[in-house]
Image: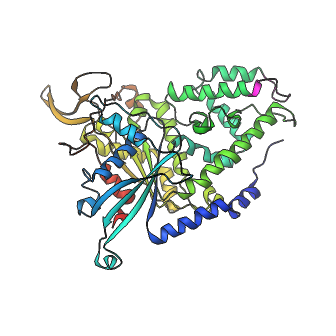
Amino acid sequence: MASRFDWAGLRDLATLPSPADLQHGLKDVADLILDRTLRLAVTGLRNSGKTVFITTIVHHLLEGRELPFLGAVQEQRLLGARLLPRPPGALPAFPFAAARAALSAPEPRWPQPTDALSALRLKLRFAVKGALRRRLGEHRSLQLEIIDYPGEWLLDLPLLEQSYEAWSAAALDAAGAPARTLLAGKWRSFVASLDPARPAGPGDPARAAALYTEYLRRCQQEGGLSFLQPGRFTMPGDLEGSQLLEFCPLPPGEAPRDSLRALMAERYRRYLDEVVKPFYRQHFSRFDRQIVLVDLLGILNRGPDCFADMQRALETVLRSFRYGPSSLLVRLFRPRIERLLFAVTKADHVAHNQHHNLRLLLERMVAEAAGHARFEGVRPAFIALAARKSTDTVRTEHHGQLLSCVRGRLKGSEEETVLFPGEIPPDLPDESDWQEGRFRFRDFAPRRLILHGAERPQHIRLDQALEALIGDRLR
């Protein structure tokens, strides 16, 4: 029998908050009235650069330097910033000190990526802008809480609107696609050897789930694919080894009460109830601003299948921020994200004259989903940036033609080199783009992060991203 989604239970979840939720809500209201707290959420799929982004924005805010396009810095109103201690019961600490040490070491290295929920808090002190506002106090403080979470978790929101049977059918269909069929071989063979209508044999659920998880991780690591559900299977965080992740899709059919198919369907429902819903209720609903980081260059390198897969993933992520009257988020709780920024990272890996096309291409990838979001009141913005600048744009002559190239140290090499990285199409790549092998963007090693007063800019548009995300709260 097909399972049905319990919308009545979901409505109850939205209308009957727990005492802890009420306590959080009262504090949120007080913070908003006093205009003193802002929660900035940072997310992105694997290799998007979340750790470097958070580390560098915190570093530059603490230093009060190299942010000329942040209004409070440009107008010399930012008086200073300092890290705040973690309050009791807070999220795990973002590893800022370790990440900054890695970037500022004599032989710098990219910091270890984060793969779970973490946060840090900053207190920003600034002079108020405007005579009327100054009558209420010349100086003001803003507590900026930065929350880091894997973008893969956002891919789970659509599951709340899918029965186990519907999700299984979609997942099995995807596993048979050319880009995935070899990667899914072991899992599909094992599932084919089972009779899902019979009771589960000893170890069958765990074995099936382990092979399904292996398949998803191979899609991510070997295939460069992005649309992988459930998201916690590739980024489990504190659920590593939990029975909550011991389920997988199965072919359609009868589901007697004690059958393997019924067991998998029940675990799927538990995953939604105990993992997906709590994340959105306890954390996502309390974010004020959101930035989504995208490694677009890496996906272009991977080819058309990976590009299309990333496009689907980004559209799904954008769907998570659609707050219209029919939105699932509104039925779950009342969300409040005010600003949403999509950022192409690693813009320094191409010449400066390609940055505009990078931004345009990202916009084109989610154009339809962004249109729906704008209709429902969400206005996503787009930017190309490099949180840690590892190259310089230089002009070189080649056969009498001037080319815009980049100079930097390639990953794994010792010396800096100059190379022509290629060009970015301003629109979605067509068939000829892929056939010509046009996209061969290289990875660069980090330059050392200068802690006190750098001689040259150490980022690209990091300050513009900050102005878009928090500038209005520093006036």
Residue 330 in percent (x, y) is at 62, 61
Residue at 21%, 37% in the rendered image: 393
Q: Quadrant of the C terminus?
A: bottom left
Residue 353 vertical position relative to residue 39 in the rendered view, above or below: above
In the picture as drawn, the residue positioned furthest to the left comes out as 400
Q: Is residue 179 visible?
A: no
Q: Quadrant of residue 388?
A: top left
Query: In the drawing, does residue 138 fall left or right of residue 45?
Result: left
203 displayed left or right of 444 = right
Instruction: Give the side of residue 372 with respect to residue 425, left or right.
Output: right
Q: In the rendered image, is residue 12 in sight?
A: yes
> Going 74% across and 31% down the picture, which residue do you hit?
250
Q: Residue at x 45, y 60 (%)?
A: 38
Image coordinates of residue 72 in percent, x first then y, are 28, 62
Front residue of 113/160: it is 113
Residue at (50, 27) in percent of width and height:
221
284, above or below 77, in the image: above
Magenta span includes 466: no
Task: Give yes or no for residue 201 being in the magenta stretch.
Answer: yes
- Kindly indicate the quadrant of the structure image that contains residue 450: top left
Closer-to-camera residue (19/38): 19
- In terms of secondary structure, what is the magenta stretch mainly? loop
Residue range (magenta): 194-205
